[in-house]
Amino acid sequence: MLNLAIFGPPGAGKGTQSGRLVEKYGLLYISTGDILRKETASGSELGQEINRITSQGHFVSDDLIMRIIRKTIRENPHANGILFDGFPRTLSQAALLEGLMDELTTRFFGVLGLEVPREELIERLLNRGKVSGRADDKEAVIIERLKEYEEKTWPVATYFMERNRYYPVDGTGTLDQIFNRLVSQIEKHTC
Ligand code: AP5
Ligand code: MG
């Protein structure tokens, strides 16, 4: 079982790189952002509540996140492992993840942290915003998301660094270059 998280600020390329990692290692992909956007698109009452929070660049509750993660795992019992994208996003979620791994009697490999300069993140997200239709790809919301990342999510990187399970990856360059760097970090630390 290879359980890991792709980590990094908004626009770092987590979603972009996830598809190939999932394919190469036969993983179950859990993108909390994608699941929340799907619920929003359904127009349900819960979706409307999620949209009110995420369109401001803020985080939904840990409780909701854990419910959607558990549901996805329950529905996919035969995966070779899990790739989390967008989780854990806070220190409390990091602790919840450790608990979840214990419950599933498996271990957590660690966090692959895509590192990209702030100016490039903003440029990527503004470009994506022209076509994505994502309510959070507007300049003011992008700035808020980066602030939330720095305040609440970056401490998660430190948490895993202290446990020797944060694996930094240069997130700039071509998609192939970045993918090769991700794979080499995985191979280096699973052998
Ligand atoms: P989420 O969906 O996780 O968004 P995010 O972390 O803000 O990140 P993005 O999806 O915007 O970026 P990405 O790193 O996936 O980059 P991408 O590959 O798309 O979360 C959205 C919201 O949901 C949160 O703000 C929060 O409100 C809520 N939420 C989610 N999880 C939560 C949790 N656990 N707890 C609480 N709330 C939660 O790439 C970005 C762009 O760059 C694309 O256009 C791409 O084509 C381009 N690009 C990618 N790679 C390159 C490259 N190498 N060179 C040039 N361009 C590139
Ligand atoms: Mg994404």
Image: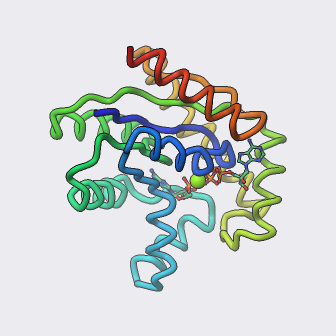
Q: Residue at the front extreme?
A: 24
Q: Is residue 185 left or right of residue 72?
A: right
Dividing the picture into quadrants, the one containing residue 100 is top left
Pick the quarter of the image with the C terminus. Answer: top left
Residue at 43%, 20% (x, y): give it. Answer: 165
Residue 121 percent location from the top left of the image: 76, 45
Q: Number of numbered discs present? A: 0
Residue 25 percent location from the top left of the image: 41, 38
Q: Examine the rendered structure and indicate whether residue 187 appears above or below residue 14.
A: above
Q: Examine the rendered structure and indicate whether residue 115 appears above or below residue 125.
A: above
Pick the quarter of the image with the N terminus. Answer: top left
Q: Examine the rendered structure and indicate whether residue 121 appears above or below residue 113.
A: below
In this view, the residue in front, 74 or 89, is 74
In this view, the residue in front, 80 or 99, is 80
Residue at 50%, 56% (x, y): give it. Answer: 59
In this view, the residue in front, 126 or 16, is 16
Dividing the picture into quadrants, the one containing residue 99 is top left
Q: Is residue 113 left or right of residue 78?
A: right
Residue at 58%, 51% (x, y): give it. Answer: 15
Residue at 47%, 72% (x, y): give it. Answer: 38
Q: Is residue 13 left or right of residue 153?
A: right
Residue 163 percent location from the top left of the image: 40, 16
